[in-house]
Image (spheres, grey):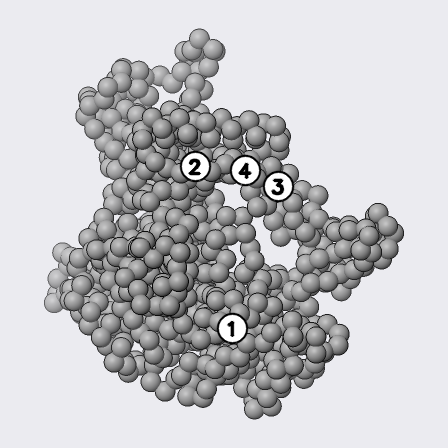
Amino acid sequence: MSETDLFGNPVDPPRHTASGHFADVAIERGIDASPTGLTYAVPVGMGLSVGHRVLVPLGRGNKTATGYVVRLTTKTELDAGKLKPIQALAPGAIALPEPLVELARWVASYYVCPLGMVFGAMLPAAVTRGTGATRRQVVRPNADADASAVKLTKLQQAVLDAARHQAGWAELKHLADLAGAKSTSPVKQLIDKGMLETKHQEVVVSSLDLRAQQLAEPATRLTLGQGQQQALDSLSRRLGRFGVHLLHGVTGSGKTEVYLRLIEALRGQRETPPGVIVLVPEIALTPQTVGRFLARFGPDSVAVLHSGLTAAQRHAQWRRIEQGRVSIVVGARSAVFAPLDNLQLVIVDEEHDSSYKQDQLPRYHARDVAIKRAQMAGIPVVLGSATPSLESYANAVGLSAVDASSEQKRAPNPQLSIAKSPSHTYLHLPDRVPGMRLPEVEIIDLVEERKARRGIHLLSRRLEQRLAQVLEEGAQAMLLLNRRGYANYIACPDHNCGWMLTCPHCDATMVYHKDKRLPLGGLVRCHHCHYETVLPKTCPDSGHKVSVFGLGTQKVQAELGQKFPDARIARMDSDTMRRAEDYQQTLDRFRAGELDILLGTQMIAKGLDFPGVRLVGVVSADTSLNMPDFRASERTFQLIAQVAGRSGRSDRIGRVVLQSFNPEDHAVTRAAAHDYAGFAAHEIQTRVAMGLPPAGRLARIVCRDKDHVAVTRHARELAGHLSAANAALKLNVHLRGPHPCPIARVADHHRLEITLTADTPGPIQKLMTELRNQGQLISDQHTAVDVDPVSLL
């Protein structure tokens, strides 16, 4: 009969443990017990190291939980006799390298997140679940075999040579393919002759074909311009030591070629291929970027990691990295945690992009985590962008570089400045590659346009003219509108009524999506909680027939179809691009000239390189300009400048037509003039005066609950604790709130925010750590802690 505790729960029988051997384990749940996790005894004979994923008993019922070993020690202040032993290694023999364990501890501390949840983000769920795993026979050269004593056929010798070039074990079919054999017979014959040793091991089967992506991009080496060569020389001299290098190059300046040459230079310095991580922000960018790296370095050297892969594909790619079979990883945000050995370089392309910031626990920023990982490894990190974030720009340049601007002289506090970071360097590519020029930009005032034109037209007369001209010449065009759907306002036409359709679960308007397959021709959807319903016919208050107005990509597509009926048009937004294959197929068709106009949201704005594009139209430059967020102007500038850069990427001049209701706004005019420095000077001075990033540091705590009274009480109590600790520790953190968020209710949860600002991150970190240690600040479903937020909605 098994023993039970005081509460009747079964107690596991005691297990012998190695005398004085203990492990701190971070449970893979939202348990914020301590910075090092929970302490367990290590059983005798268990081969354990830091980073291993293990099974442990948790709670009074000793329910099995998974966790990660973060520390091994021979001493503990706890009663060793009462410590529970680790049950076993988790299935799959998963172990994270010790540098990643240290990085996880930093992420957990800096972003105020339970350590176990950081490990959960580091390791793809497909890996922990073993998706696609099976047992297969694998082989490798037998080191004890005497090749001179055995007669081999040419095909057998080719197989043996291929095996010798492989790192570690290889599958029979893979080895046969490398040698050009039609079957695995030559491999099996080498096993019989003792030239190859064999075993069965777990392998992951997936359908991802990187060779197809390799063939999609040419392997040509472009001639470097003077600016590219200078940047490459500067970066090459800094290999082997930590530094943050901002490569600020206008669109079309050839930043990707600099990345490729830098990796070649790094590989040429070392006998063993060095590890390189290349981060890209959008799934739409990944196929083209991956293709360029595959074309240059081959599919056996490159792995990909992004959310567009199937679970089995993610598992297979992660295993290739973890087993040391590849040296280059290209991927989106989570690829920053790739378990690469011998990491020597990190590249963050389009470093300004907000998709590098995760919006759920752990709320890390991949760019900043990349910098920290590089710092811990003592290696360089390259940040590339045509429109750098103001944080990166200020760190690399400092405010002194823009002192002479007129904006600086008119600033309210000209004595304030931002010092350059000693770890950052600034590399500038001001010109496009030889043979290409920046496009000409026309700004269209939509207020004046509507005065002079009857009816509602989403395309101005100038944009229509330019489109007609481009189509007549057989060239291509791209149109940007960063708003999906058909219309974003459904309201009563009676001005005395004022009714507008809003989401019943959020403080936000509903968006109309046309769908001819539905009885009423469409539905209305909330873009925050995804609630859907049919479009009402009449106003519930006045009985009038509702009006549908506003704009979205669907409506622009409909207008394009009416005005250019012969044009081949594709729409690229999250409504039409559901899978990675959808992105790839649409971009392949556009590249092949099978489409004339590509219409889309911000996913078409960055990184895409299509020489046939002669015109870019920005349907509305104002969609994000008036958002209640201090970064609204910066985002507007970046989006306009990036999408404008898709035009004229050949020897023919490109054009951009920029439509705006605010044609004099400095973000619009500076983007049209390709004047990043002027925009940055103006915007940074505003931030300096307000003490906002990059002049200061910011954290945001959002309290949320379906009960408005409960969330108000919780937010006020938390604000009181913050204020008391701030005064006691004399940290001089500026606290604001609690007050309602700009969107005060989402998915029936009321939301109140508290913001913390300071000159440096230290005081904010000390304040939050103090409350975290006291158990008064816990990241859970009711409290979201966002350090260095990129959005304040």
Element at badge 2? Answer: strand
Which residue type carries mark 2? Leu
Disc number for residue 735: 2
Circle 3 residue: 745
Which residue type carries mark 1? Leu
Q: Residue at x 39, y 62 (%)?
A: 410
Is residue 104 shown above or below 161? above
Circle 1 residue: 587
Circle 4 residue: 739
Element at badge 4? Answer: strand
Badge 1: few (under 14), some or many (20 or more) residues near its Cα, within 10 Å?
many
Q: Residue at x 85, y 57 (%)?
A: 545
Closer to the eye: label 4 or 3:
4
| Image marks 2 and 1: residues in contact by CB distance under 8 Å | no
The answer to which of marks 1 and 4 sits earlier in the sequence is 1
Badge 2: few (under 14), some or many (20 or more) residues near its Cα, within 10 Å?
some
Q: Residue at x 81, y 58 (%)?
A: 493
Q: Position of residue 96 (x, y in %)?
A: 30, 44
- Residue lying furthest bottom: 473
The answer to which of marks 1 and 3 sits earlier in the sequence is 1
Q: Position of residue 767 (x, y in %)?
A: 35, 33
Q: Nearer the viewer, residue 47 or 57?
A: 57
Which residue type carries mark 3? Arg
Badge 3: few (under 14), some or many (20 or more) residues near its Cα, within 10 Å?
many
Disc number for residue 764: none
Q: Label 2 vs label 1: CA separation?
A: 47 Å
Closer to the eye: label 3 or 2:
2
Q: Label 3 vs label 2: CA separation?
A: 22 Å
Is residue 70 shown above or below 504? above
